[in-house]
Image (cartoon, grey):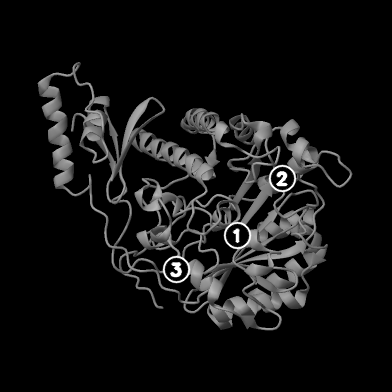
Amino acid sequence: MKHIKVVATNTICKEKGTGCGECQTGCQSACKTSCTVGNQSCEQKKTNRSTKVRQD
Amino acid sequence: MVHTYECLGRHFLLDVESGSVFIVDELTAKLIEKRSPSACAKGDFSKYSETEINEANAEIDELIRQGVLFSTQPEHPEPIYKGIVKALCLNIAHGCNLRCRYCFAEDGQYHGKLDYMSVETAKKAIDFLIARSGSRRRLEVDFFGGEPLLNMEAVKETIDYARKVEKTAGKEFRFTITTNAVALTDDLIEYFNREMYNVVLSIDGRKEVHDAVRPDAGGKGSFDKCLANALKLVKARGGKSYYVRGTFTANNLDFAKDILALNDYGFGQVSLEPVVLPDSSPLALKNEHVDGLKQQYELLAKEYVKRRADGKEFGFFHFNIDIYNGPCASKRLVGCNAGDEYLCVAPNGNIYPCHRFDGMDEYVIGNVNDGSWCDDLPQKFATTNLTKKEDCNECWAKYYCSGGCAANSIQLCGGITKPYKLGCELMKKRVECALAIAAIEGENK
């Protein structure tokens, strides 16, 4: 494309099986005052995010 | 919904619902704005040829066809309260060896008296966490205060106990500690670097800025001791996670200099948070400061990109958005989980929605010592996710802040559904910068 450079698409994963809850809570890392969730990491990202199913 | 903006001399485009990020030219940014449902101006396209306009429109149409631009909002499921807890902030000491002028905890004592958590209460907190954690495997415990180093015996015994019971319980504990570093010793540094998954060290930036607001009990600035101890810890950390975390106030509206100073001192991972205080405080950030504060984030972003391109280690907590492997949509709806999966335990065993509520009688959920527990507050917090907060659904930054801090909303704005607007403005600017940085760095790889 000449006018648009695609950096990343569909970055917000809505697949079935996400929401396992194993990721870090937003306030436990460094902020303690500003809730930024966008900079948290997905614990499943290195393995199989789409296949792990929430247990509860 | 889409969001177009300029940052670092470039135009960026975010498709909110899909999270897709694009670098666009000025023409495309204008055409996108024209297509936006809320557009009121038609824009001046006189300097572009018809061919250019048609080309850009064709590219936009193609991305819409692919479902990554102007994508529609999915139906988010109604939030459900499950009664699961996976993280505790242990306020192990209600007391502090510093007298920070902006401390929300009133010299670390949380509106009460000097108090230290007993080992017995701390162990009960661990038992409480395991018992309430359902199928969650990774459990987090942050030692907080006050100053947790004032009660290290309880910290060490808590960790020993948790390590002893975690395997049987099928859990894995991750410990973090937030300290002002004043009382750090070589032995403690070795211990923290072995046991703590993350260490948060409090320094506010330049010496004169730090000393003006973080004096010790005798009124003397604490910077020199904090810096020396923090550097020693970080140098011995061996690549493990840490943050040097400070607060900026109306005293240092040029706070970008403080973040850069922290990096100059030798800290690769830093965070500097806007102070949250009522307008009546002389240190409070006010609406008239917002434009200048946004400029500071932009200045910081420019230098941030440069330093990183030069190979310097420099991570700023709020610019650290991974646009490729970030949290899933479910996580983005619930935010920090305060009051639900994340709770705070005070020295007397009282359980609160988070550390910011410690000492507020009306926010006591239960007590780990007597086993008391009431579902009312956790249920309220759990079911008030992003979709229930006023104005958030129409905000382009909603999936990055998740509706913001519940404590700020309740304590400053009169209710959990009411966004803390000053914080929103700063958050949006930080997200703009973070996405721009990720896009530019991705482009250069």
Q: Is residue B176 above or below residue B313?
A: below
Closer to us: B75 or B145? B75
The percent coordinates of residue B158 (x first, y second) are 71, 72
Location of the C terminus of chain B (image quadrant):
top left
- Dot 3 and dot 1 within a common chain: yes
Q: How dense is the environment of label 1, judged by Cα within 10 Å: few (below 14), some, or many (20 and up)?
A: some
Q: CA distance from mark 2 to mark 1?
A: 28 Å
Q: CA distance from mark 3 to mark 1?
A: 30 Å
Mark closer to the chain start, 2 or 3: 2
The percent coordinates of residue B382 (x first, y second) are 47, 68
Read off the residue under disc 3.
Answer: B383
Q: At x 54% / y 63%, what residue is drawn?
A: B338
Regarding residue B74, the answer to whether it shows in the image is yes
Read off the residue under disc 2.
Answer: B102
Foreground mark, 3 or 1, reads 3
What chain does mark 3 sit on? B
Q: At x 59% / y 68%, what residue is drawn?
A: B343
Mark closer to the chain start, 3 or 1: 1
Read off the residue under disc 1.
Answer: B197
